[in-house]
Amino acid sequence: MTELPDPDRSRVVLVGAGRFARLAELPAVSANVAALRDMFTSEEVWGLPKGHCTVLRDPREPPAVSQAVKHAAREATDTLIFYYAGHGLIDPGTGELYLALYNSHAQEVYDSAVPYQWIRRPLQASRAARRIVVLDCCYSGRALGAMSEGLGLAEIDGTYLLAAAAENALALAPPGELYTAFTGELVALLHQGVPGAGESLTLNEIYERMRVSLRTAERPEPQCRDRNSLGTVPFVRNPAYEPSAIAATDSPEAAMRRFVADISHELRTPLTAITAVTEVLEEEADRLDPMIRPAVRLVIGETRRLNDLVEDLMELARFDSGTAQLVTAEVDVVKEVADCLQAHDWTALVTLDAPRSVRAQLDPRRLDVILAKLISNALEHGRQPVTVGVVPRQTELLIEVADSGSGIRESMLPYIFDRFYKGNSRRPRSEGTGLGLSIAQENAHLMGGDIEAANRAEGGAKFTLRLPRKIQDNQVSEIPSD
């Protein structure tokens, strides 16, 4: 295991228990899980598909957690990660570690909280090559002891446990801070990376950095247990990695692109925090004072727009730096289009005109990005009906997205794929970033294809995506076909 975990064959379960009926509340926990979800799904860190990251916020009963872990353990074949933040409880009779939920009772943990054994056993049975447990709770170090039992998790190759505190120590949720002490350090490290380190970070490097930083700050010192040297293999990308500095002869355009990339990266940390807060506000929006409710919804909407802009800028930075990669698979393109329409709730708005099945070898994630950008553009700037047609040819594949609007002004057609171009928007302030079509085109080029924009004789605009049926020269890696 010398390569980064394959995100398509990995699963993550994030459990955040911050609200309780009988225990002290932990407001920072909601921000914890939101930030880690954003980190793991970020291309800069790992690129885990969002559908592979299960988030449980304030689950009420233990079976909800157990079922989520079992499901993820069955699906993962590369990496399986379980994370919990909340109260750690000890069974007074056995001394075993339990993970508290909303209805947990400190004196009756055996039937109101999640026994750590329920987490350990599905991980034991999983086919995942790497199994990682991260516990941010009091007494979490007790799980290290559980790993050492005769049939414990530590007896299975490729396991790693990271705990926020020693077996008899309390974890820390500093008053007034957005995250808990342990997870806040983890989030900062995943975002900032380690300057001077390699292109990727190992679990041991992450642990050592966290341990030194938390000890220096006089905060609870984390614990870890490694089995079969899983902690020494690459785990996530190192955002601080710089293969070379900007040369003095770099063009002004290259320097500006680097500047945009750096600014976008620096915005990620405050945006992650703001997003976590707005998610909490959104959950409480219906219970807020009606006078401030519109302002809260405005902040939520604008935060999402800013997130979209930063994500788009970082995606373009990957193309500019040459770090964008392909992960190809043989897929049914018609099914991929149908799944995209369903995922965005567009099935009632868009007509799919395609054969029953069209097989092609390409990058399904990047195809989904292209489809989402083209279809959302047609729905926003055109008029219904909007159609998506799939036309198979011997060596190439055509996907046509057409709307019935007023079309694109002829003078604007040469610039339609330029960055930040909104010349065709009929709105004084478009909801988009002006980057969607350029990102779609960059993804098409990466797969050896192209996108053409034109006006239809019968009215409306049509975007035609051309892709080879099998990517070869640009292929970087391959995942099993569906």
Image (spheres, rainbow, N blue to C red):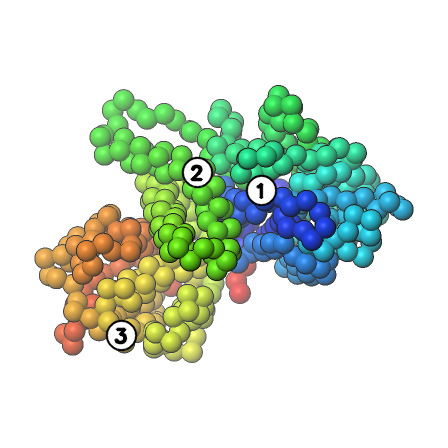
Query: Residue at the location (26% across, 28% down)?
Result: 250
Sequence-wise first label, 2 or 1 = 1
Residue 221 on image: x %, y %: 68, 28
Total marks placed: 3
Density class for disc 2 (Cα within 10 Å; few <14, some 14-19, many ≥20) is few
State the SS at label 2. Answer: helix
Sequence-wise first label, 2 or 3 = 2
Q: Amino acid at mark 1?
A: Ala
Residue 334 on image: x %, y %: 41, 71
Q: Please name whichever residue, 47 or 345, is drawn nearer the observer in this view of the structure.
A: 345
Q: CA distance from mark 3 to mark 1?
A: 44 Å
Q: Are marks 2 and 3 in contact (CB under 8 Å)?
A: no
Q: Is residue 117 in view from this perspective? A: no
Q: Are marks 3 and 1 in contact (CB under 8 Å)?
A: no
Q: Are marks 2 and 1 in contact (CB under 8 Å)?
A: no
Q: Identify the disc placed on residue 323.
A: none
Q: Which residue is mark 3?
A: 384
State the SS at label 3. Answer: loop
Q: Which residue is mark 2?
A: 270
Q: Amino acid at mark 2?
A: Pro
Sequence-wise first label, 3 or 1 = 1
Residue 270 on image: x %, y %: 43, 38
State the SS at label 1. Answer: helix
Locate residue 346 relative to residue 87 in the image: left or right: left
Mark 2 against mark 3, which lies toward the viewer?
2
Q: Amino acid at mark 3?
A: Gln
Q: Which residue is mark 1?
A: 28
Q: CA distance from mark 2 to mark 3?
A: 39 Å
Choose top left, top right, bottom left or bottom right for residue 436.
Answer: bottom left
Q: Is residue 383 in view from this perspective? A: yes
Query: Can you say whether 356 is above or below 235 in the image?
Result: below
